């Protein structure tokens, strides 16, 4: 080896070592900023006051293994969806805003139960600055513990991306570890696909089920590769989940003395029937049809998109046959918020929280809020959208509130 060749080799090694050093330094800086940001948001959470109830309902585990609330009065459910907490150094401020809005609405509404229909986390690194999806899960769970409010999550596609540090099972284990006393998530049967297929019952003091709340994992993407998410090939509720649903309705009917209980189902990705119903309504000049009765809301996604699976999972047909489920509630499409009655079953999109995922969405506001569901003692229910930008939702942290003067009701 000549002297000239040796010098070139040495130069290459120096450049390579320097590059590695710069990368390691950048990673350390990012990690340090993320750590400081998470601590900042944890301090914000500690400043939030516990919700004061006059008589807070507390669930107990029933003989069927499911959590059960007992009441002879109305039962108040808040549906939240697509909170999209990044948990990294790029999303610190937006994470605070998301946590702030959740705390503000819960403090005002005082729901008996909060159901979160997916995408608590958003560990997409070029927007959040991290692959660590547990950061987001921890922040949200700590907030709900601080508020002292019972909550039930369903998994969304972003909660556990294929490139995230933690799998669906690991996040499920984290939520159900016993650290979060107000989290009612149950993993569900091991022989049924997904994490978090479970039921929460509402009973009256006579022991009759007045409403069953069925939470299901609507899966994520078809396949396991990153490319699946990029081209939006969403998965569907699997066949053995539909079978599980049918068996649970039968079991609940037996438990209820032979009377089929009324139920509501919650998951993240909409069924294909959401698309079918809306297209039928639009094709009829935005007028009701024999199958579709419009209730409220709109499709606000660009090109009137409804991002559902291509395949019919069969859950809607199973619900029609079982005669129990009155309504399906989902999230996923942040700008869609309609509710329609389709063949006798209510199909409802919840208001989203998202400050992070859709570019520029922090400055929009017409789509941000919660959905309030009131279940009556006779099993009937009502739902209505509640926009976040109302006087009754006094923000916990005024500095992290987007004012009415800055948000753009674009959709």
Image (tube, rainbow, N blue to C red):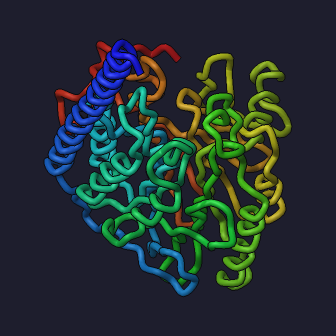
Using the image, determine if residue 373 lies above or below residue 91.
below
Q: Is residue 383 left or right of residue 126?
A: right
The residue nearer to you, when weighing 135 against 1, is 1
- Residue that appears at 49% across and 36% down: 351
Q: Is residue 271 left or right of residue 405?
A: right
Q: Is residue 345 left or right of residue 97?
A: right
Residue 383: percent from left, percent from top: 54, 45
Q: Quick one: which residue is furthest to the front in this view?
A: 2
- Residue that appears at 46% across and 19% down: 359
Residue 386 appearing in the image: no
- Quadrant placement of the N terminus: top left
- Residue that appears at 45% across and 75% down: 70
The residue nearer to you, when weighing 67 against 88, is 88
The residue nearer to you, when weighing 249 against 95, is 95
Residue 117: percent from left, percent from top: 52, 48
The residue nearer to you, when weighing 245 against 15, is 15
Using the image, determine if residue 347 lies above or below residue 390.
below
Residue 352: percent from left, percent from top: 47, 35
């Amino acid at each position: 080896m000549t002297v000239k060749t040796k010098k070139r080799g040495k130069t290459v090694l120096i450049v390579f070592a320097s590059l590695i050093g710069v990368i390691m330094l950048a990673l350390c800086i990012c990690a340090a900023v993320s750590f400081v940001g998470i601590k900042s948001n944890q301090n914000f959470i500690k400043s939030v006051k516990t919700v004061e109830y006059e008589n807070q309902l507390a669930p107990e585990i029933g003989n069927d293994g499911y959590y059960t609330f007992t009441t002879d009065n109305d039962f108040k459910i808040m549906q939240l969806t697509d909170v999209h907490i990044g948990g990294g150094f790029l999303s610190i401020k937006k994470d605070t805003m998301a946590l702030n809005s959740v705390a503000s609405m819960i403090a005002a509404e005082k729901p008996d139960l909060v159901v979160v229909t997916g995408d608590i986390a958003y560990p997409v690194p070029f927007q959040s600055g991290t692959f660590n999806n547990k950061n987001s899960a921890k922040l949200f769970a700590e907030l709900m513990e601080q508020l002292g409010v019972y909550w039930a999550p369903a998994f969304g596609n972003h909660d556990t991306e294929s490139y995230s540090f933690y799998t669906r099972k690991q996040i499920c284990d984290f939520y159900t570890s016993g650290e979060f006393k107000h989290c009612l998530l149950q993993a569900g049967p091991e022989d049924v696909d997904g994490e978090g297929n479970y039921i929460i019952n509402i009973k009256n003091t006579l022991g009759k089920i007045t409403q069953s709340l069925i939470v299901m994992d609507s899966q994520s993407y078809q396949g396991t590769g990153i490319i699946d998410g990029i081209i939006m090939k969403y998965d569907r509720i699997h066949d053995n989940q539909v079978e599980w649903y049918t068996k649970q309705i039968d079991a609940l009917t037996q438990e209820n003395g032979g009377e089929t209980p009324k139920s509501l189902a919650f998951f993240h990705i909409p069924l294909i029937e959401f698309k079918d119903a809306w297209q039928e309504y639009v094709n009829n000049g935005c007028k009701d049809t024999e199958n579709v009765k419009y209730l409220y809301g709109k499709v606000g996604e660009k090109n009137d998109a409804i991002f559902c699976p291509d395949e019919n999972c069969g859950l809607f047909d199973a619900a029609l046959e079982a005669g129990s489920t009155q309504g399906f509630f989902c999230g996923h499409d942040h700008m869609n918020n309609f509710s329609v009655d389709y063949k006798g079953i209510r199909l409802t999109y919840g208001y989203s929280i998202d400050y992070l995922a859709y570019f520029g969405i922090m400055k929009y506001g017409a789509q941000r809020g919660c959905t309030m569901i009131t279940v009556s003692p006779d099993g009937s229910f009502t739902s209505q959208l509640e926009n976040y930008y109302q006087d009754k939702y006094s923000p916990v942290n005024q500095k992290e509130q987007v004012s009415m003067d800055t948000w753009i009701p674009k959709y």
